[in-house]
Image (cartoon, rainbow, N blue to C red):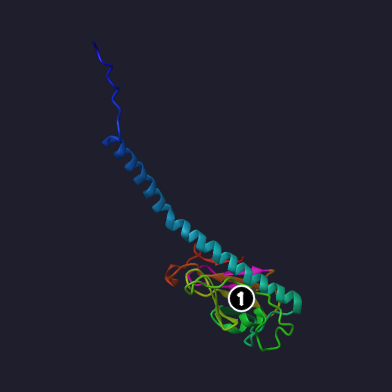
Amino acid sequence: MKTPSKPFSRKGFTLIELLVVIAIIAVLASAGFAVGPAMMNRAKKLSAQATATNIANAVEQFYTEYSALPDPGSSTADATFATDAAPLLEILTGTSTSDQNPRKIRFLSVKEAKNGLDGAVYSGNSISKILDPWGKPFYIMLDYDYDERLSISPQKAPAVTLNGKRVAVYSNGAKELTEASAKTLVKTW
């Protein structure tokens, strides 16, 4: 009499199946690592763009409220201020002791910086500086002769003349100034 034999049941994976799965994971990981730094840089540029636009809007709101541009005391025909100095920032945040913002209106609100990057650095209750994601200041150019014409010469980028603008904000957009170029520049125009 014949006894019925059990069909062969396999437990686990073969070596070929494991090697195929490992190869697929390696290809996907290498594709992810290649795209990662480019996506991080894009995210930094978008964050810097949002902050620059926020600063420009604050200056425009100040102008709308007081019919003048904020002047921390060094106005010339067209003046450029870096956001690593507090006087202009204090005027825009309403924490200045000067009479520039007598109603103490807070025109500018920026997220707090993490590890000294990408946001506002506070000193007490007031903003002492605003930095881009690379740890560099933004540059704010104001049209103090009120001709609505700004001539801007960012470092390592071509000069540009803006018509119809009272304010322009930009960041070099790179960790090192030697890396800044027209391609890496973050700007509001």
Q: Of residues 83 and 80, which is closer to you in this image?
A: 83
Q: Of residues 59 and 5, which is closer to you in this image?
A: 5
- Vertical side of 37 occupied by 136: above or below: below
Q: Quadrant of residue 71?
A: bottom right
- Vertical side of 178 occupied by 129: above or below: below
Q: Position of residue 77 (x, y in %)?
A: 65, 81
- Vertical side of 93 occupied by 17: above or below: above
Q: Residue at x 43, y 53 (%)?
A: 35
Q: Quadrant of residue 4?
A: top left
Residue range corresponding to the magenta coloring: 150-163
Q: Of residues 17 and 68, which is closer to you in this image?
A: 17
Q: Quadrant of the N terminus?
A: top left
Is-magenta flag for residue 155?
yes
Q: Is residue 61 left or right of residue 42?
A: right
Q: Residue at x 61, y 80 (%)?
A: 89
Q: Is residue 4 left or right of residue 35?
A: left
The answer to whether one can see residue 17 in this image is yes
Q: Is residue 156 left or right of residue 4?
A: right
Q: Of residues 56 and 163, which is closer to you in this image?
A: 56
Which residue position is annotated with label 1? Answer: 141
